[in-house]
Amino acid sequence: MAGRPAGKSASKAPAKASAKVTIPQLPWSQARPAPVVLVSGTEGFLADRAIRALRDELKRNDPSLEVSDLEADGYSPGQLLTVASPSLFGEPRMIRVINVEKCTDAFITETLGYLESPADDTCLVLRHGGGVRGKKLLDAIRGGLGGGVEVVCTELKKEQDKVDFASAEFKKAGRRATPGAVRALVAAFSDDIAELASACQQLIADAAAEITEVTVENYYSGRVETSAFKVADVAIAGRQGEALVMLRHALASGADPVPIVAAFAMKIRTMAKVSGSRANASQLGLAPWQVDRARRDLQGWSDEGLGRCIETLAETDAAVKGAQRDPVFALERMVSVIASRGERR
């Protein structure tokens, strides 16, 4: 009987490690450097935030930080050991690995070996978006191999979680926003945490005084019912009729044409930046989730059509700022051009 439990325990080691996590599990906002940092969870925007915060902290500690990027789903044997090898001048290193949820067998094997003796002055950041692939590696990390921490980035589903997130955005910037203003923002952008963050940052940059419900209404009126980003998404997907109906509903609810154009411009500019480029997200100055979204949006688009839409956006921006007498006509024309992917009809 004595031998049986021991054998059972050994065979169940990964599951036990998964059940009993021995490393710190931190929220995205409290990410901190460690020899290995597992960034887990399905919320890509918060994961990108956490990884960027890690890089910034490491840079503050030593501006000579050397940053390397690997893709676990296209991993070739020896890559990790190569980038983790000591450099000539001994700079500290940060190794960012994406798509660990799709990793190759070679990546699992070599990373487990690396974690037995992590390189000095190196922070290995592993981004795992969910699923069972790589479970052996995750269980080992959570069981303490490598002396790491886990940063958990789950979706913010509860309204209070989103309110807390928006409040933290203003607090971090040293700006005061009333509870009513925060809740109005959450109501307008509840479907997408990235858009909520963008709205907070716009108010932080543009609003001069205390941010109130009136401020939010002036900037984002009508978005509680219809977000400008939703109109843009529908138009980019080619659903012209639906996009025009949503646009008219937003305008009837009091939405300002200027932020509507800004929302379209933000998405089209990102698509243009990604189109035809093989650069990674950091080289483009974008978050990985933005690149993934832009690539999906670009399906069915031509470079000529994209260029025509950019020209139309510039004309519409001028129109809604006073260059034309009928900004609504300019907006509807913009939606029609974008919904047709810039193709002449």
Image: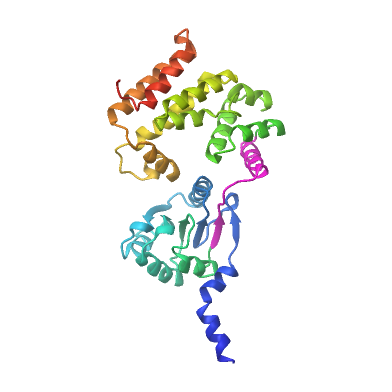
**Residue drawn at (61%, 39%) of the image:** 169
Q: How many marks?
A: 0
- What residue is shown at x 43% (from left), y 52% (from top)? 65
Would you place residue 74 above or below residue 206 in this image? below
Instruction: Please provide the residue range marked out in magenta.
Output: 149-174
The answer to whether residue 146 shows anywhere in this view is no
In the depicted structure, whether residue 103 falls above or below residue 169: below
Left or right side of 111 for 205: right
Residue 191 on image: x %, y %: 56, 38
Q: Residue furthest top?
A: 325
- Magenta stretch: includes residue 152: yes
Task: State the image coordinates of residue 42 (x, y, percent, origin top left).
Answer: 51, 51
The residue drawn where x is 46% and y is 69% is: 136
How far from the left and from the top, in percent, is residue 106?
A: 35, 67
Residue at position x 63%, y 38% from top?
166
Q: Horizontally, is 186 left or right of 89 in the view?
A: right
